[in-house]
Image (cartoon, rainbow, N blue to C red):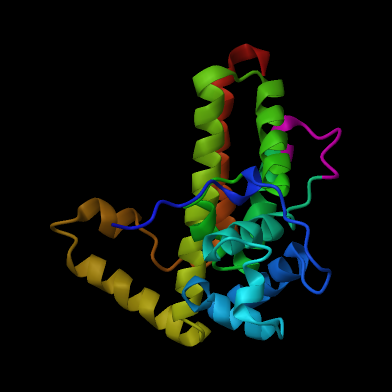
Amino acid sequence: MPRPRPSAIWLREEPVRKPRLSRERITRAAVELLDVEGVEGLSMRRLAARLDAGTMSLYQYVGSREDVLDLATDEAVAEIAIDDVEGLPWRAAVSQQMGRGRQVMLRHPWLPTLMSTRPLLGPHALARSELVYALLRGAGLDGARLTAAVGALTYYVQGYAAMENTWRGLRHEPAAEADLRRRAQEHLDRAAERHPTLARHADLGNDDFDASFQLGLDVLLDGIEAQLGPRA
């Protein structure tokens, strides 16, 4: 039987060790390795080699590879700036945060997957969650509606960034991407009798990720704003 995973690293104290390594150094090296190799390419052995250290020495600072992934996730989330939202209307501030989150996930293609598969209890993740909750609470949401709104926004950004990273990873040449989109649209056109709505309205030729992301985000924000009623 698989061994149960210990409690999240954020719920355990950092051990006092000799200063040659630290959680901070290990975390920075892990982010760099993830950017190059992805999640599957991160191993304790490779991480130790990047730090010019022995593999077993890492376990004096972290308990497992999962701990390293938790730390790296929070380190990357820290790049989502939160220090200049004061004075913005709630909708503009939330839109800004979601857009910044997407940009960070594009810089770190491994991030959307990790954010959706582990508890985000690190200090940077909690600070950003606090901001989004506070913005929507200040707009008038509370209870289950507040939680649902935060979840809808979060999962939209993670899913969109994951899709965009996958697409860009598969299609490096603009000409090849345009050709694929053209052939896909032609395929839908030929299937118009069976799928008339798709053939007419699924715009497979649209390659403007920025505009499409913002439009989808605006649809979500419109729905959230509709929940607020006249007070908004």
Displayed quadrant of residue 100 = bottom right
Residue range corresponding to the magenta coloring:
83-93
- Please say whether residue 101 is visible from this viewpoint: yes
Residue 66 in the magenta stretch? The answer is: no
- Indicate the quadrant containing the C terminus: top left, top right, bottom left or bottom right: top right
Q: Residue at x 58, y 60 (%)?
A: 63
x then y, percent, for residue 223: 51, 30
Q: Is residue 208 above or below residue 4?
A: below
Q: Residue at x 53, y 76 (%)?
A: 43
Residue 210, quarter of the rendered image: bottom right
152 and 215: which is toward the camera: 152
Q: Is residue 132 left or right of residue 209?
A: right
Coordinates of residue 19 in the picture (x, y in percent): 84, 69
Q: Nearer the viewer, residue 74 or 216?
A: 74
Residue 37 drawn at (x, y percent) = 55, 80
Q: Main secondary structure of the magenta part?
A: loop
Depth check: 108 or 215 in front?
108
Q: Is residue 156 left or right of residue 96?
A: left
